[in-house]
Image (cartoon, rainbow, N blue to C red):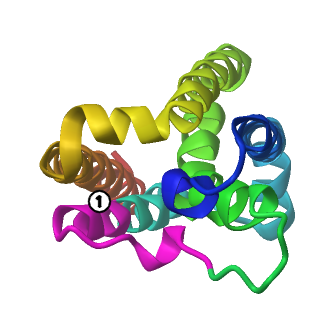
Amino acid sequence: MFASLAGSETPVRQRRIATKALTITFIVVVLFALLGKTIFALFDITLPALRITGGVLVFLVGYHMLQGSPSKLHTGEDDGDTDIATSPLAVPLLAGPGTIATAMNYSVAGGWPATAITCLAFLALCIITFFCFVFSARIINLIGENGLSITTRLMGLILAVIGTQMLVAGVTEVLHLSTGT
């Protein structure tokens, strides 16, 4: 997606776009990770409901990747605004509903240690993503279109399984709450 949106830009401009997109993404995810419990309390949302909804969203993104098409949850139209870093890259491509739900899910479930681990893990992912963005043209040339297609589908499978696991955990928790066990 980055290569298709920013591939015609100069390398300096690509680095600026990547830096801005990932900075915004990191801030959005950290805010949701830190404020997850407050948001839950404000809207009377339960962790099982988030797990179920987040699981469905993550599964759908993975399913679309398995089909070889981008998820409608992770694409956006460039409306002529040259700031592609904010939209569609930062939101909703990188900090989409599935990412936000996943960050909140892990943060709320484990308290402050889990929140810190979630934020650090997401920081590492942002750094890796930065290098993938900056070197996206080279990566595509190296692995080729077939390699990119295979990688996309494998990542789609992994996302679909993560989504299914989140859904199973949410439903299991709802069942345990309803039976009182």
SS state under label 1? helix
Q: Amino acid at mark 1?
A: Gly
Residue 47 in sight in this render: no
Question: Splitting the image into 4 quarters, where does residue 70 fall?
Answer: bottom left
Per the rendered image, the range of residues in magenta is: 59-76
Would residue 156 be found to the left or right of residue 147 on screen? right
**Residue 159 appearing in the image:** yes
Image point (48%, 60%), residue name: 54
Residue at x 58%, y 60% (from the top left corner): 93
Which residue appears at 65% of the width and 37% of the height? 108
The magenta stretch spans residue 67: yes
**Residue 127 included in the magenta stretch of the image:** no
* Residue denoted by label 1: 62
Task: Name the magenta segment's main secondary structure.
Answer: helix
| Number of marks present in the image shown | 1
Relative to 131, is 88 on the left or the right? right
Quadrant of residue 88 within the rendered picture: bottom right
**Viewer-proximal residue, 78 or 117?**
78
